[in-house]
Amino acid sequence: MILKVKNKEGKNLGIFEVTAGGFKFLEGERDEIMDHTNSDNPLFPYALKSFLEREGYLVSERYPETEEEIKKLLAGFPDDDPNKIDILKRLPEMSRLEQTTFLAGLRKIEGES
Amino acid sequence: MPKFESFSEKPKPKRTTEELRRSNAELRRQLEEIRLRTSKQKKETLPVSRSVSKPKKEQLSAKFEKNKERKNHKLSVLTSWVRSVFLGTVIGLAGSAAIQKSAEFFVETKYEDQLKDLKELQAMKEKAQKLFGDVFKYALDQESEGEIFEEIEKKPIAESLRLLKGGKPRQFLNKAQERMKDEEVVYPIVEDIVSSEGLIEKILIETLLADNMIPKGWVNDEVESITLKSQSHLIAYEGVNSRALASYSGGGIKEGKKEKGRIVFYKDSSEHVSAEGIFNALWHELGHANGPTSDNESNDFERLKLMLSLAERIKSPDRFYSHYVESIQEQDEQKRNYNRIMEYWAEICAQYFKDPTELHFSDFQLVDTVVKKADSDYNAFAASIQRGKMLKVLLASRLQKVG
């Protein structure tokens, strides 16, 4: 599970991948979050996410596989298409809902063509 | 003597070599004429047959361009729709018109329209029975269903379908929607709730249940009370070994009568949870009050469809990750499926009210469809921003007052 964590004031604390048994920092500093206990329980990533939320951190999940699929589906459109340019530009900052809405829409377009 | 006289024809005279040569030449000429004529006819028909079986390059490329244009246009429609919805989120506009536009793109047919015949309904029931066991029947209003099926058994299939599609459930639903439009929020009985940050006064809870903050139909007819109990309550699911923060009981349609449910917070747990955590639990319990076995604005078929959709979502790799749901590990598969879908629903509802932008599109659609039945003007994005701001201000003023 890849989590993006901000503190209560909205300061970005980083993006990290959490699995049962380990952290892998992808972006940002590790100080604050690494204080929390680690565990090899398979439910640890979910438990950590719930814990951080309860503690008041702003936690959002990142989904690189969704971004990759959107890019793959957009490959069939011309590179100078302004909509394609816009989507690709904003993709990393899009919310989960916006990304998955685009994905559902692109899958639909692909299925119809 | 040859007897030729009896014939009207006289015997043909023998042809000379010259005559034979001329006759053969004439024959060749005629044959050549026929060959030419046939080949001309063939040539005339060829282009027609070629265009059907093998299109020319130009024709192919025009078709390809047209398809490409159509595909690009669809991307443009999709982009402008998503942009209008999410721009509405950022600047806090009520983008309900933009959300309505989604109907143009994702044509969500009404459940009733999907029921091509009775067999489909039966298939859904069989599927639900396999997945959840007999408990799936909690989603059905036994009395109204009984009436409909009694009628169906007496009638031919076409008429039965009319009963299913336009019968009691739909009339009931339309009435509920019409009524909700003009109705004021009917506040449940509310008590102060203890949190780790102090007492959350009932006025604060009532303010957050007000019109536009939570869809009217999710409170009216659904919630009788929100109270605080001093004794603790253990969560009964296998795998979840903890005390409950809150619970929901009652509600739904029992023997044809609508019942309101009760939300209870448990002081032993709530006093260790932040005010924000208390409100998240409240959104979760509101989800239960409007869920697949309890929502008073949905009919039997819609509730059953929701159950089956949730059963797909809990197994999907892109599902909403909830520690609570994933922890439910009942040995009995049907029981596990049922408990997981019920809690998954409540979890995605809590996220919908907390911050809908963090939901997967499929989960957002499930909740938003049920919300729109009760309150067609409700805008999840604007309401979530408004509620968040108000919660901050109210909690800050309350904390100041306490401090």
Image (tube, grey):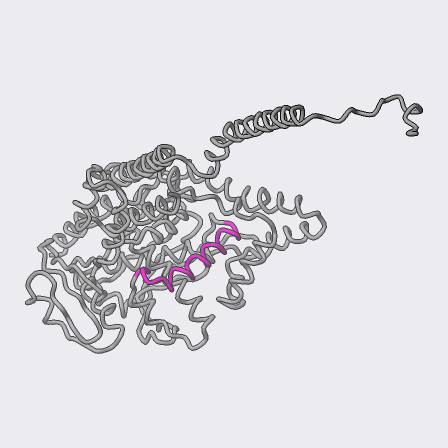
Q: Residue B303 in magenta?
A: yes
Report the residue that reaches farthest toward the front: B1
Q: Residue at x 26, y 51 (%)?
A: A72
In front of the other: B238 or B197: B238
Q: Is residue B195 above or below residue B302?
A: below
In front of the other: B68 or A22: B68
The answer to whether any part of residue B106 appears in the image is yes
Determine the image quadrant of residue B383. Answer: top left
- Residue B92 horizontal side relative to residue B140, left or right: left
Number of labels in the image equals 0
Determine the image quadrant of residue B8. Answer: top right
Expressed as whole percent of the image width and height from the top left, the position of residue B65 reads 32, 35
Q: Is residue A31 above or below residue B27?
A: below
The answer to whether any part of residue B96 appears in the image is no
Expressed as whole percent of the image width and height from the top left, the position of residue B187 reads 37, 48
Q: Residue at x 54, y 62 (%)?
A: B137
Q: Is residue B364 above or below residue B320?
A: above
Of the 4 image quadrants, the one containing the N terminus of chain A is: bottom left
Of the 4 image quadrants, the one containing the C terminus of chain A is: top left
Expressed as whole percent of the image width and height from the top left, the position of residue B272 reads 21, 67
Give the main secondary structure, helix, strand or loop, of the magenta stretch.
helix
Q: Residue at x 30, y 37 (%)?
A: B72
Expressed as whole percent of the image width and height from the top left, the position of residue B269 reads 27, 68
Q: Residue at x 49, y 67 (%)?
A: B132
In front of the other: B249 or B88: B88
- Please provide the residue range marked out in magenta: B299-320
Q: Residue B8 in magenta?
A: no
